[in-house]
Image (tube, rainbow, N blue to C red):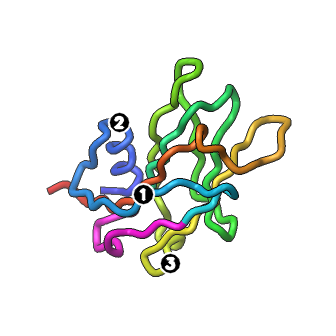
Amino acid sequence: MPVALLALLVLLTGQPAGAASAGQSGRPDGNGETTLALPHPPRQGEAAILAVTLGVLTRGQTVEVTTADGEPIGTAAPFGPQRGQGAGTVTIPVPAGALRDGRLTLRLRITASGSPPRPPTAEEVGELRLSVIGPPR
């Protein structure tokens, strides 16, 4: 099953289509950076995914997720949240090339039209969770 389809199933159902191995979770530091570790390197048919729990974002704000080197991994944007409430969790597939020795170093930035990118606050981005998902059993 393609990685994008597995990630879509996680996003829609909240549960992986196949077995999931919980990895490390954490929060970005004051610079918007963090390093997370996988429980094991992805095996044949498995993929790494990043779950980003979004807090309260204002209209037009997005969370850009890159490696420490600036390679884009994905963008997390709220979809239909109520004013003043958290925006839920967004799942982003992690490219295999972004992993180094089973670890993923991330840099997160809040972007909005007319404003320079900046690190997120604890209220804007909550938990980051790195996991391995596999094919259906």
Badge 2 or badge 3: first in the primary sequence = 2
Name the mark nearer the viewer: 1 or 3: 1
Q: Secondary structure at mark 3?
A: loop
Residue position for label 2: 12
Q: Is residue 12 above or below residue 72?
A: above
Q: Is residue 117 magenta?
A: no
For the record, the magenta segment spans 35-49
Neighbours of disc 1 within 10 Å: few (<14), some (14-19), many (20+): some
Residue position for label 1: 25
Residue 45: mark in rendering = none
In x, y percent, where is residue 47?
36, 63
In x, y percent, where is residue 71?
65, 65
The disc labelled 3 sits on which kind of residue?
A: Arg
Assign the magenta stretch its main secondary structure.
Answer: loop
Residue position for label 3: 100
The disc labelled 1 sits on which kind of residue?
A: Ser
Query: Splitting the image into 4 quarters, where does residue 29 fall?
Result: bottom right
Horizontally, is 56 left or right of 2 in the view? Answer: right
In x, y percent, where is residue 22?
30, 59
Cα distance, mark 1 to mark 3? 17 Å
Q: Quadrant of the N terminus?
A: bottom left
Residue found 53% across the figure and 70% down from its top: 98
The disc labelled 2 sits on which kind of residue?
A: Leu
Name the mark nearer the viewer: 2 or 3: 3
Badge 1 or badge 3: first in the primary sequence = 1
Badge 1 or badge 2: first in the primary sequence = 2
Horizontally, is 28 left or right of 51 in the view? Answer: right
Between 25 and 38, which is closer to the camera in this rendering? Answer: 25
Q: Is residue 95 above or below residue 118?
A: below
